[in-house]
Image (tube, rainbow, N blue to C red):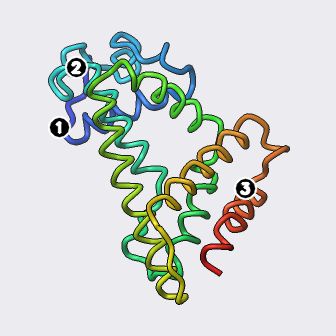
Amino acid sequence: MARFTRLSSEDRRAQLMDVALAGLAKGGIQEFTVDRICAAAGVSRGLILHHFGSMSGLLAAVYARLYRDTTPDLATLPPHGRIEALIEGNFAPKSFNRETLNAWVALWGQIANTPALRDEHRRQYQAYLDEVAEALAALATARGRSVDARPLAKSLICLIDGLCLQHCLDPDAMPAEAAKEACRAFLAPYLD
């Protein structure tokens, strides 16, 4: 019987990212080792290098995946629905939970010391910031308002990050509905 299962390159990459992300969510960066990931995936050590070039490459790929999995896609929505989708999506159970926070915190802690991760963070954050700023500008225009969308987008993203952190630390003190309302209240003076 074969010791390893043969998967397509795309499926193997996804499997390795799944295992790495699950480890980060469960035990933080201490779980992000070649041996732990390979054992959990049932693969040889060389596959991480083959698919990601290095552990730093895997870390960057996991970061990009977490961004994609937890940030809502706003581009296809009409202006009036984008910001509401952003608020609802960021505080949905798949994004707004302790395991996801564990993964984010583990990754954030490595950004300063991992150039590949720092570069990926910059790419992901810039794209997210651009998307949120565009959504805010479009909504303001649709409502006959004018906003300085980029600084407003940065502030909204920081507010969302802080509310997510508070919720994951103490869900009773910051329930999802309260977090959503805090975001809406923050934006009201600019968009209503």
In which quadrant will I find the C terminus? Answer: bottom right
Mark count? 3
Q: Amino acid at mark 2?
A: Ser
What is the secondary structure assignment of the residue under circle 2? loop
Q: Residue at x 67, y 73 (%)?
A: 189
Mark before the other along the chain sequence, 1 or 2 = 1
**Do the numbered discs 1 and 2 sit on residues whose CB atoms are within 8 Å?**
no
Q: Which sits in the foreground, 86 or 145?
A: 145
Mark toward the viewer: 2 or 3: 3
Mark toward the viewer: 1 or 2: 2
Q: Residue at x 40, y 35 (%)?
A: 18
Measured as percent of width and height from the top left, residue 47 is found at 20, 21
Going by the image, does 42 lie left or right of 178? left
Q: Is residue 186 visible?
A: yes
User: Label 1 vs label 2: CA separation?
Assistant: 16 Å
Dot 3 corresponds to which residue?
179
Q: Residue at x 84, y 44 (%)?
A: 173
Neighbor class of circle 2 (other Cα within 10 Å; few <14, some 14-19, many 20+) is some
**Do the numbered discs 2 and 3 sit on residues whose CB atoms are within 8 Å?**
no
Measured as percent of width and height from the top left, residue 64 is found at 35, 42
Dot 2 corresponds to which residue?
54
Dot 1 corresponds to which residue?
9
